[in-house]
Image (cartoon, grey):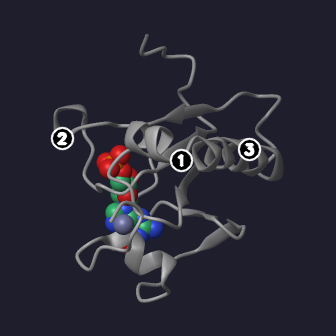
Amino acid sequence: MAGEAQADCVFCKIVAGEIPSTKVRETEHTLAFRDINPQMPTHVLVVPKAHYPDAAALAVADPGLAGAVLAEAGRVAEEEKVVDSGYRLIFNTGSGAGQTVFHAHVHVLAGGGLHEKLV
Ligand code: 5GP
Ligand code: ZN
């Protein structure tokens, strides 16, 4: 069923506490934790606790939860004090675009190289 934990999903395991992570923020329905392989000084992942394969699928199934993930990304940026300098939110969607974990997540990136625009 949509949203149910997947046994083979690394982020479901992090949400369940079965794999350790460095928690940044937590709400009833979302979790923010540091990326294990940071690409910038600030590199935090925000996920819904429920499993959806990507951000668009999450938004279709539960727009409110998708909004909550985005709001949490903004709160992470505030807590990391990167709002003034700027930060970037990235949703890799599909393996062709670099998605490696098929549990919806947004990367919150800041602290270096953001002047190099992708688009
Ligand atoms: P994607 O490539 O799917 O957009 O992003 C997945 C991200 O999850 C990668 O940046 C990767 O470093 C991170 N990641 C993968 N496994 C783990 C893990 O076990 N713990 C943490 N904290 N991050 C992980
Ligand atoms: Zn999952």
Instruction: Judge: label 2 CB < 8 Å from ligand 1.
Output: no
Residue farthest to the left, as pictured: 96
* Label located before the other in sequence (3 or 2): 3
> Mark 2: few, some, or many residues within 10 Å (few <14, many ≥20)?
few
Q: Residue at horizontal 70%, vertical 70%?
A: 28
Point out which mark residue 77 bears: 3
**Which residue is at 49% across, 39% downward?**
59
| Image vertical order of residue 89 relative to residue 36, above or below | above
CA distance separating discs 3 and 1: 23 Å
Q: Nearer the viewer, residue 20 or 9?
A: 9
Left or right, 100 with respect to 34, comes to: left
> How far apart in space, not on screen, are marks 1 and 2 (Cα)?
23 Å
Indicate which label's residue lies in the foreground, 1 or 2. Answer: 1
In the rendered image, residue 104, in percent from the top left (x then y), is placed at 42, 51
Compare marks 3 and 1 and give the one earlier in the sequence.
Answer: 1
Q: Position of residue 12 (x, y in %)?
A: 40, 73
The type of residue carrying mark 3 is Ala
Mark 3 and mark 1 residues within 8 Å of each other at the beta carbon? no
Of label 1 and label 2, which has the lower sequence position?
1
| x and y, in percent, of residue 4 in the image | 38, 70
User: Rounded to the nearest whole Å, what is the CA distance between mark 3 and mark 2?
Assistant: 26 Å
Which residue in the structure is indicated by mark 1? 62
Residue type (three-letter) at the residue carrying disc 2:
Ser
> Which amino acid is tagged 1?
Asp
Q: Which residue is mark 2?
A: 95
Q: Is residue 101 above or below residue 115?
A: below
Of the 4 image quadrants, the one containing the N terminus is bottom left
Decide if ligand 2 comes within 8 Å of the CB at mark 1.
no
The quadrant of the picture showing ligand 2 is bottom left
Q: Callout 1: helix, strand or loop? A: loop
